[in-house]
Image: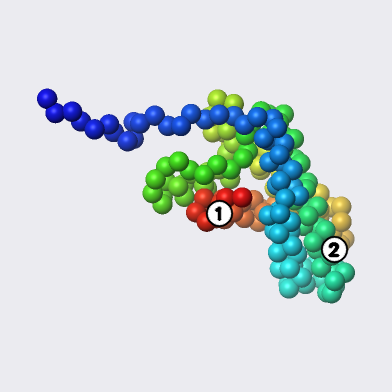
Amino acid sequence: QQQSSPDPAKAPKDPYVFPSSKHRLNRYVKSTVGPFSLLRSAASAGIDQWNDSPEEWEQGASGYGKRFASNFGRNAIRQTVTYGMSEALRQDTGFERSKRKGFWPRLSDALVQNVTSRTRSGKRVISAPLIAGAYTSSLIAIEAWYPERYSYKDGLRSGTYSFATGFAINVIREFVYNW
């Protein structure tokens, strides 16, 4: 009799293991004040400085400092809301590189992680922590320290841009460098 080789689609996957509380806390701290989060805040401040946005903050070192502080603050709020909600809901919001082969399956896995989290059992669910973090941080920033001409609508727009940027970041983390 001829023995068939196992079907890779039916091969057992690596079992999902929910990260420890220490790992989740370390990930929160790193995503809030780690080198890549600081670099992202600095780069975003540079883009805002280039675009003179908001113009009330003017140019020069003082304007860049306000933009950097704003981006850093928004990120700190986003990470704190995401972390707090993920702990309360017992969800894992962390990014994990795909274990699948091929460009399209890996791309799909990277994109879906921007809108889903894992439960303790490993099941993917729509991620309230990730969505709330993106929008809450933008709304708080607009209402708390942006110039008066900005409104909650600008906060919602900014939250949408921030949320959409997560897709690009996940693709970079999947295919280029995972920090």
* Residue marked by disc 1: 177
Image-quadrant location for residue 132: top right
Callout 1: helix, strand or loop? loop
Q: Is residue 68 above or below residue 105?
A: below
Identify residue type, mark 2.
Lys
Left or right: 94 as drawn, with respect to 30? left
In the rendered image, the vertical position of residue 159 relative to residue 84, given as above or below: below
| Residue beneath the point at 35% across and 31% down | 11
Q: Nearer the viewer, residue 147 or 110?
A: 110
The x, y position of residue 3, in whole percent, is 18, 28
Measured as percent of width and height from the top left, residue 147 is found at 86, 62
Question: What x and y, as percent, mark residue 42?
Answer: 74, 62
Mark in front: 2 vs 1: 1
Q: Which structural element holds mark 2?
A: helix
Dividing the picture into quadrants, the one containing residue 99 is top left
* Residue 82 shows in the view: no
Q: Is residue 99 left or right of residue 48?
A: left
Residue for point 48% across, 43% down: 98
Q: Nearer the viewer, residue 4 or 147?
A: 4
Q: Nearer the viewer, residue 116 or 155?
A: 116
The residue under label 2 is 66
In the rendered image, the quadrant that contains the N terminus is: top left
Disc with the residue nearer the chain's start (2 vs 1): 2
Residue type, label 1: Tyr
Q: Disc 2 versus disc 1: distance between alpha carbons? A: 29 Å
Mark 2, Cα crowd under 10 Å, few <14 / some 14-19 / many 20+, is: some
Q: Which mark is residue 82?
A: none
Pick the residue in front: 165 or 20. Answer: 20
Using the rendered image of the protein, determine whether residue 77 is visible from the camera's viewpoint. yes
Vertical arrangement, residue 167 with respect to residue 149, above or below? above
